[in-house]
Image (cartoon, rainbow, N blue to C red):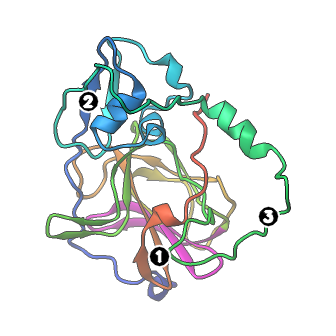
Amino acid sequence: MGAGAGKVGVLSNEHREPELLVVTHTVEKGETLYRIARTYGLTVDELMLANRLDDPRELKVGETLEIPGAKEKKAVTTFDSPEPEPLARPRAEKDREKDKPPDKPVKKPMMKVGRTNGALAWPLRGVLYARFGKKGNEPHDGIDLSAPAGTSVKTAGPGTVLFAGEQKSYGLIVIVEHPDELITLYAHNRDVRVKTGQKVREGQVVATVGDSGRTSGPHLHFEVRKGGVPVDPIEFLGPVPPPEK
């Protein structure tokens, strides 16, 4: 891939993506976000993120929800449970609480590999349907975010474009080098908006979502590498971006 390839590490020519399948759940009378999330082994926040919901109270009967990571539909129990149901709050309310000054000074923890530290921003707001690790017998070196074709793909942080172009199986990709030996990779794009060697800022549009390369539908395959070794992007990503207006 030219200059900087050694910093990225190995990109497998046999890169495979899981089938783009998403289980949906239709909300029935008596169901709440909490009960639906618990049924599928998710948190309320994960379910809200996947469906771009800002207020859990907006859930309506007949509404269709996407259930990330689910393999099949499940029946939601709606009868009273001895376990009290926590009251989910709107995201805006949670954000306001985060903005409140702490009662006592809080010492900011040092950045550590393998710990959530918010060193990087999310490249887009989409449905997280495949995580880092293995899919069957195949390694999966990043996360997959389903989003409509043409959605803007933004840099996770400031840096320099190591490569922008086509790579077998990954399709059209952009690879950006950041400080602290971090590399981010954005794959399966419809087009790329930057050139190799170009300086980029955080949040700059570098590509748009597509289905180039070896994949079954439009989405972004996003990788983070530390010293050339793939690491779980979730451990480096900060707050989820708000819905685009």
Q: Earlier in the sequence, mark 2 or mark 1?
A: 2
Q: Earlier in the sequence, mark 2 or mark 3?
A: 2
Q: Is residue 203 magenta?
A: no
Q: Is residue 224 above or below residue 3?
A: above
Residue 116 is drawn in which quadrant?
bottom right
Taking 88 as reference, is 30 above or below it?
above
Residue at image x 38%, y 58%? 143
Reply yes or no: does residue 183 show up in magenta. yes
- Tell me the magenta residue range: 159-184
Residue 22 picture quarter: top left
Instruction: Tell whether label 3 touches label 2 (CB within 8 Å).
Output: no
> How far across and how far down the image is residue 174, in percent?
48, 64
Locate residue 67: give its quadrant. Answer: top left
Going by the image, does 30 lie left or right of 175? left
In the picture of the structure, the residue carrying the numbered disc 2 is: 24
What distance separates the C-alpha of mark 2 from that of mark 3?
Answer: 41 Å
Q: Which residue is mark 1?
A: 225
Task: Give the residue number, with chain letter if any, for mark 3.
Answer: 106
Q: Nearer the viewer, mark 3 or mark 1?
A: 3
Vertical placement of 3 versus 128: above or below? below
Question: Circle 3: is it few (<14), some (14-19), or many (20+) Cα within 10 Å?
Answer: few
Q: Secondary structure at mark 2?
A: strand
